[in-house]
Amino acid sequence: MKNPATSFILPRALCTTIVLAVALAAATPCRAQSSSSFGSAIEDYFINWFPRVTQIQSEQPHWVTPLVTVTPRLEEEVRYDQLFESSKNGVATDNFGNGKGIELIPFQATEIIIGIPPFLNRNTPKNTDGFGDWPFLVKVRLLSSNEEHDNYIVTAFMGFSVPTGSNVNGNGHALFTPTLAAGKGFGDFSVQSTVGVTFPNGGHDTLDRLGMPLAWNTAFQYRLFKYFWPEFETNYTWQSYGGDTGHSTLYLTPGILIGRIPIHDRVGLTFGAGYQVAVTYHQKYNHNVILTARIPF
């Protein structure tokens, strides 16, 4: 005769075991699937990087980036600039890099620029050579239309710099520069312009020393024979120090850019040169030779 207690206990234990086994079996594939989906999404993001960039850039004009004025267009490229500045008091400054670096389009309508701190070399005074601050820039494209339609673009920037430079070549404080940029094309002719204000991270003493410069840059370009882009830029800055009435500085910059010359697949080459001349009494320098080389991809 069977023991009633045993007949009751064995099925209950078996049921408990089955339930636990089913729960574990169901949970393990879910975790694995979740991890696999995440890894697949990351992989797809990088695999589709260039097709995504091509699509984003197809929705905007295809002008070339000016020498000084930051283009409102979204670009992917590596850039190096070389400046040779000279002032009235005989000081000559060679600027290696000018804060340029790598430009990437990681998301829809967004570009980030990771600059490289420039290295400044002066003929006088001695022992003033060194690196400047570390610059960054984020662009968000607001409106755009390519050449086949209305041929324009409007973009918002937020630039900032980390005070990594030496005492002579750095600002000593972080700087933030919100900027609005726009461009309009008329056939082979185009105008690109930016206006922004720089705010130092600091108190009244910092504001009095650095001021809050307002910069307005405009580039006029014409496309000639497919790869040649002669241009003329106006580079204007208004700045006030210590609560005074402020002063204006205006540079005129004629130049020429050649590009984008295809090298292989997406990779190309753009290079150019310009000569910047001060036309106002207040000036940081009065002559500046600008050389630039970019590898768009």
Image (cartoon, helix red, strand yellow):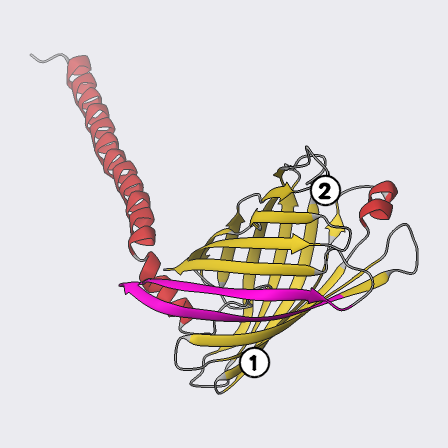
Looking at the image, residue 67 lies above or below residue 134: below
Frontmost of labels 2 and 1 is: 2
Which amino acid type is shown beneath numbered disc 1? Lys
Write the residue at 52% across / 64% down. Answer: 273
Query: Is 254 contained in the magenta span?
Result: yes
Q: Give the residue at the far right of this rendering.
A: 244
User: Residue type at mark 2?
Assistant: Asn
Over which residues does the magenta segment extend?
Answer: 250-279
- Pinpoint residue 140: horizontal percent, then vertical percent: 55, 62
- Look at the picture and state if 97 lies above or below 21: below
Say whether residue 152 is left or right of residue 129: left
Q: Nearer the viewer, residue 87 or 244?
A: 87
Which secondary structure dominates the residues rendered in magenta? strand
The quarter of the rendered structure image containing the C terminus is bottom left
Q: CA distance from mark 2 to mark 1?
A: 34 Å
Between residue 174 and residue 90, name the one nearer to us. 90
Q: Residue 288: x percent and y percent?
A: 64, 59
Q: Which mark is residue 184?
A: 1
The residue that disc 2 covers is 171
Image location (x, y in percent) of residue 249: 78, 64
Q: How many marks?
A: 2
